[in-house]
Amino acid sequence: MAHSQMTPGVVAGRLPPETLERNFTDLHAPLDPHEAAVAADRCYFCHDAPCITACPTDIDIPLFIRQIATGTPEAAAMTIFDQNILGGMCARVCPTETLCEQACVREAAEGKPVEIGRLQRFATDRVMDAPHPYARAENTGKRVAVVGAGPAGLACAHRLAMLGHAVTILEARAKPGGLNEFGIASYKSTGGFAQAEVEWLLSIGGITVEYGKALGGDLSIAALKQGFDGVFLGFGLGGVRALGVEGTDKSGVRDAVDFIADLRQAGDLATLPVGRHVVVIGGGMTAVDAAVQSKLLGAETVTMVYRRGPEAMSASRYEQDLAASKGVRIIFNAAPVAVIGNGAVREVEFAYTTPGATETFRLQADQVLRAIGQTIATTPDGLALEDGRLAVDAMGRTSLDGFWAGGDCAAAGDDLTVTAVAQGRDAAMDIHTTLMGKGA
């Protein structure tokens, strides 16, 4: 029997295949050459441009836009890649509305910034099908392990390989990419771009990837220290915070990150189950991605519930508005107190969190997605922690000599792809300096 938006429970195939395909097309269509020229012409090419300061990877944004404006997008791509080797993905997923575009003087003057993200995509896409533009330096004889094939690890590995080191990436999953592959909304990165970008990055040579290798068991800190001249830890966050309320063991309650990963890896979206009434608990980017995609899969109602006000949400105003535009309801200042149902979830009870409030309310739900933050799944032995993550200094050095860290597992910066890339790149430079200072 065919299912619809009205079918009770958690089922697949709520929408016809053609509607699902349309729902999950590119959120922002790529610019054509004429559109890119027009968009580039709006840039003032500021001296001491505030957009550069706002970019975690310090890309010379006015320069690459000028290169587009003068008809040399390949040169623009190199300006980007010199600072951010994952510039193609960042052009798609980076919250430019709160970073470079928010800092744009056009935004301050007119409320309409230069479309930096789309221009970055225009430039980087031009060279993705070409031979890899970077060559490796002479082999240094040094071996470096990179634990985790996410944005931080990939950026670190590429820079180390370019500098002549032999790099081994140790990845727990069966595919590389980290959150770029498993953790972002499908409509932000379509057409298998995440894997294509990784293959392009690895084509520099000098990088070996081993899968099914996670910290713990055979892969220990001691073994890494013995087997390599340096180690970069970029394994991300594998644990999910618990709701801490009664009833979370009921069928239909799951982690939003797992829901998104299943969606990202689904060959046919019509086979992916989604509830009729979905409740997403949390206020970050993961919560928005899970909520919007639930709606796009055919859920009749989707409600996000966040314990604080809109100004405290880590999801940007743009992301909040995107959710609302797709039919997602957002309730602020409320926290769950119980998941209710007989075996399977039927309702979720919430209490208002505003001072003096005593009222509770219930939302109908047959699927509840938890998006209240992640934690390190395994704490490596001998490494100091800060706020539940690996403590690092400005160059990514951990408390253990010979070990660096970056990305979500490190206690530094925002949980953004672009920040992870910057941390991986900077750690690679410090690893190189340290190893070469020790002699050949």
Image (cartoon, grey):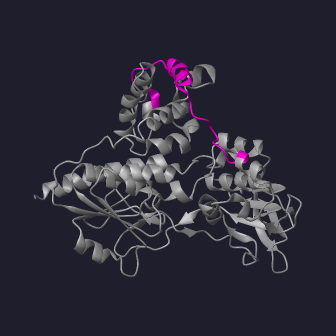
Is residue 34 in view from this perspective?
Answer: yes
Q: Nearer the viewer, residue 420 or 242?
A: 420
Q: Nearer the viewer, residue 16 or 254?
A: 16
Q: Residue at x 61, y 35 (%)?
A: 29
Q: How many numbered callouts?
A: 0
Position of the N terminus, as image quadrant, is: bottom right
Q: Is residue 38 magenta?
A: yes
Q: Could you say which quadrant of the image residue 409 lies in?
A: bottom left
Q: Residue at x 41, y 53 (%)?
A: 199
Residue 77 vertical placement versus 359 (above, below): above
Is residue 394 in view from this perspective?
Answer: no
Kindly give the residue lying farthest to the right in the view shown: 6
Q: Provide residue 333's location: percent of width, then percent of height.
A: 75, 54
Residue 251 vertical placement versus 288 (above, below): below
Magenta range: 22-51
- State left or right for residue 403 relative to residue 359: left
Q: Could you say which quadrant of the image residue 359 lies in?
A: bottom right
- State left or right for residue 408 relative to residue 422: right
Q: Provide residue 39's location: percent of width, then percent of height.
A: 54, 22
Kindly give the residue lying farthest to the left in the view shown: 439
- State left or right for residue 128 relative to residue 400: right
Q: Provide residue 207's location: percent of width, then percent of height.
A: 30, 58
Q: Could you say which quadrant of the image residue 372 lies in?
A: bottom right
Position of the C terminus, as image quadrant, is: bottom left
Q: Is residue 351 magenta?
A: no
Q: Provide residue 250's location: percent of width, then percent of height.
A: 76, 77
